[in-house]
């Protein structure tokens, strides 16, 4: 079926964000600083939700899992990028590239479903408040989270099933700091137009469809609140604005990368920075700075830690 064999290419060269050495040093410091903030911010959200009993509710359970996925998302690519910029040269094995793509799409698919679960949670909380604890029970939360990971796994397996056996026998340079399907497929030794279309159909159309589904659901929630009581509209809008911001930050780059017919390397690299270094910082910031319960819980947690330090 294939004339070549992918065993001819044992590793890929990642060209990174820049090949200019002084720029690499700047990006090294910049990326390290952002990654430290990502770790601290998302771990703070997760630990606050776990340790504060007042936050043991469905919304914060889902939020803590979103922060965990964001942390994994960044950890998948950013530490290697920092190490590679420090060394001035970057390679990744064929198997390592495939594993990175696999985990990337598991996390991406899981976060996509988790955002749908968060939209469902807000719909029930705002439109059916009397039935909230009955519908969003601990069992339902576990089912939603398990479903998110299972669907993410299925999505990733379906993606790799198309490309894992492609032959690679020529160029092995990827003009990015991580492996993903659009660049991986282009290096194959065969005509890949049909394969690119299948990947676009799987990732691009699903991302676009889910994005519009979420936007419509949030509009429906606001319309329902407006019809029932105009006094609660500003409160609902304030609550949902954080969710809408996160949805736009997550789906915007995905839709552009997989659906835009005229990809350019500088734009792709900017979107990669947005995906792996900016969004994982903004997500916890958006939810904590706009949420009184989270801010109060963090104050209680910090007071408790200071009290323990004084005792010791």
Image: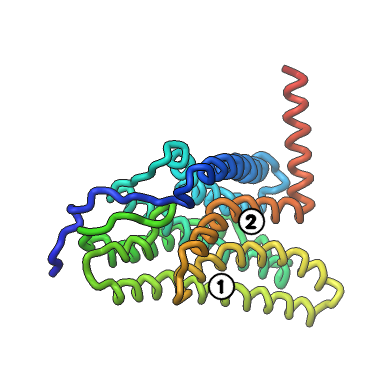
Secondary element at image label 2: helix
Looking at the image, which is closer to me, 302 or 128?
A: 302
Mark 2 vs mark 1, foreground winner is: 1
- The structure's colour scheme is rainbow
- For label 1, count other residues whose C-alpha is less than 10 Å away and answer few (under 14), some (14-19) or many (20+): many
Asked whether disc 2 touches disc 1, contact meaning CB atoms under 8 Å apart, the reply is no
Quadrant of the frame with the C terminus: top right
In the picture, measured across the screen, residue 166 lies left or right of residue 298, that is: left
Q: Which residue is mark 2?
A: 58
Quadrant of the rendered structure where residue 204 is?
A: bottom left
Residue placed at 45% from the left, 38% from the top? 83
Q: Residue furthest top?
A: 312
Q: Position of residue 291 (x, y in %)?
A: 76, 54
Q: Position of residue 184 (x, y in %)?
A: 33, 60
Residue placed at 49% from the left, 46% from the top? 78
Q: Which mark is residue 211?
A: 1
Looking at the image, which is closer to me, 111 or 249?
A: 249
Establish if 229 lies above or below 80: below
Gap between marks 2 and 1, in whole Å?
Answer: 22 Å
Q: Position of residue 292 (x, y in %)?
A: 79, 52
Quadrant of the frame with the N terminus: bottom left
Establish if 22 lies above or below 215: above
């Amino acid at each position: 079926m294939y004339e070549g064999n992918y065993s001819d290419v044992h590793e890929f060269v990642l060209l990174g964000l820049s090949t200019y050495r002084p720029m690499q040093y700047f990006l090294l410091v910049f990326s390290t600083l952002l990654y430290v903030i990502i770790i601290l911010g998302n771990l703070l959200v997760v630990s606050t939700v776990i340790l504060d009993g007042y936050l043991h509710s469905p919304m914060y359970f889902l939020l803590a899992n979103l922060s965990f996925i964001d942390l994994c998302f960044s950890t998948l690519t950013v530490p290697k990028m920092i190490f590679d910029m420090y060394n001035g040269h970057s390679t990744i094995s064929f198997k390592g590239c495939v594993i990175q793509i696999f985990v990337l799409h598991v996390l991406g698919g899981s976060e996509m479903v988790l955002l749908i679960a968060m939209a469902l949670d807000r719909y029930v909380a705002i439109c059916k408040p009397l039935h909230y604890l009955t519908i969003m029970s601990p069992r339902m939360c576990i089912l939603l989270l398990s479903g998110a990971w299972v669907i993410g796994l299925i999505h990733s397996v379906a993606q790799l099933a198309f490309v894992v056996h492609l032959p690679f026998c020529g160029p092995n340079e990827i003009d990015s700091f991580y492996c993903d399907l659009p660049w991986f497929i282009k290096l194959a030794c065969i005509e890949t137009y049909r394969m690119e279309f299948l990947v676009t159909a799987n990732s691009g159309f699903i991302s676009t469809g889910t994005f519009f589904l979420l936007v419509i659901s949030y509009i429906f929630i606001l319309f329902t609140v407006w019809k029932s009581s105009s006094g609660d509209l500003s409160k609902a809008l304030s609550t949902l604005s954080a969710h809408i911001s996160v949805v736009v930050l997550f789906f915007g780059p995905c839709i552009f990368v997989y659906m835009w017919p005229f990809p350019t390397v500088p734009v792709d690299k900017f979107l990669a920075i947005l995906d792996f270094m900016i969004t994982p910082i903004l997500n916890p910031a958006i939810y904590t700075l706009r949420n009184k319960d989270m801010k109060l819980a963090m104050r209680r947690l910090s007071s408790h830690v200071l009290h323990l330090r004084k005792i010791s």
